[in-house]
Image (cartoon, helix red, strand yellow):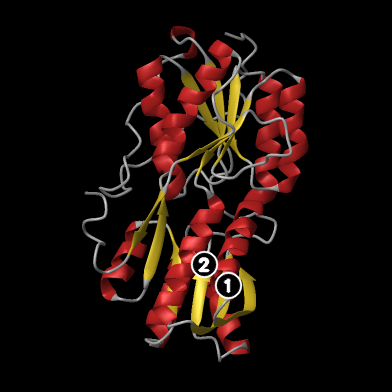
Amino acid sequence: MKKKLCLIGLISVLLSAGCGSRNKTVPDLPPAPAEERDYDFIFVCPIIDNEYWQSCIQGIWDADEELGTTTHVTGPREAADFDREIIRYMGEALESEPDGIMGYAGIRAMFPLINQAGEKGIPFLAVDSDAPSTTRIAYIGTNLYAFGYKAGESMVRLTDGMAKIGYICSSFSAQNEAEVLRAFEDAISDYNMDIIAVGEGWSDPERAAGAVEAMLAECPEITAIFCTGGYNVTGAARVKKMQGLNSLILVGFDDVEENLAFVREGVIDALLVQLPYQMGYQGVHLLKEFVDKGKVERDAYDTGSILINQENVDSYWE
């Protein structure tokens, strides 16, 4: 175990238990002290206070308990400017020289820092978003192309293959969301469906709602909205409900409580759900395997996805 690990700038995060019954919650106590563990890892999280990432952190800490590792969590707490803030936290993680780093790799500015980790002999595992051109040891997360294609197929079914679509992403610089969009566009390409407007929601319901309002004001002919990123569809659903846009089709991501309530009401037509708990849990196992053996078996590990609608919203975890 490396001894230089500096906890300045790192957070052993205590997160609330309000994630809902589908997502495991973060324990009331942090992991045991590092000196009692075999390895020190760092998870560079893009948005710590996001429910999606809380589930990932729970998986990490459950794996720590099982394996005797310690994973420190660091990163911006809120969505505002996360794509710039995460770079600073990654730099601090590198300076700490842990035994391994797990992190979100969906921002291109992360790529040089991931390569720096490789140069320092620190294994970096890409979580949720991949950076295959870097020295990362592997990717753990959803097969983004399959995920986006499934979203496109769902939109085709919901619109009978005819739609003028608005698209809301978290950030235009998010490479993982760009890959999802590419697959979505492939899925709808043979139909009378076009994306006619795009906007950024920053995975924040209020900012996403503002982007949707502006989009609909400029392009009132929009008949459907596709949202990538955690809370963007939440903002879109608030606008749809508030303005009484009952015919507007909404497809988005993530089973946070408000989104599930909107599905039950018929405001959100379909949600695609990733499995962040598995990303965190399996990620720690993979980092430990790499440190122990100097390799992992595969280049990418798909944690799968689930499609939620009114028919299965209360049973999809069964």
Q: Within the image, what quadrant is residue 44 found in?
A: top right
In the rendered image of this protein, does residue 153 appear above or below residue 7? below
Q: Residues within 10 Å of mark 1 (few under 14, many from 20)?
A: many
Residue 219 placement: quadrant:
bottom right
Q: Is residue 311 shown above or below 158? A: above
Measured as percent of width and height from the top left, residue 228 is found at 53, 62
Mark 1–mark 2 distance (CA, rounded to whole Å): 6 Å
Type of amino acid at the residue the image marks with label 2: Cys
The percent coordinates of residue 151 (x first, y second) are 47, 65
Q: Secondary structure at mark 2?
A: strand
Q: Label 2 belongs to which residue?
A: 227
Residue 196 lies, with reference to residue 78, above or below; the image says: below
How many marks on residues? 2
Query: Residue 28: x percent and y percent?
Result: 32, 31
Q: Quick check: 189 above or below 143?
A: below
Mark 1 or mark 2, earlier in chain: 1
> Residue drawn at (54%, 11%), measured in percent from left and top?
292
Q: Are marks 1 and 2 in contact (CB under 8 Å)?
A: yes
Q: Which residue is mark 1?
A: 167
Residue farthest to the bottom?
A: 221
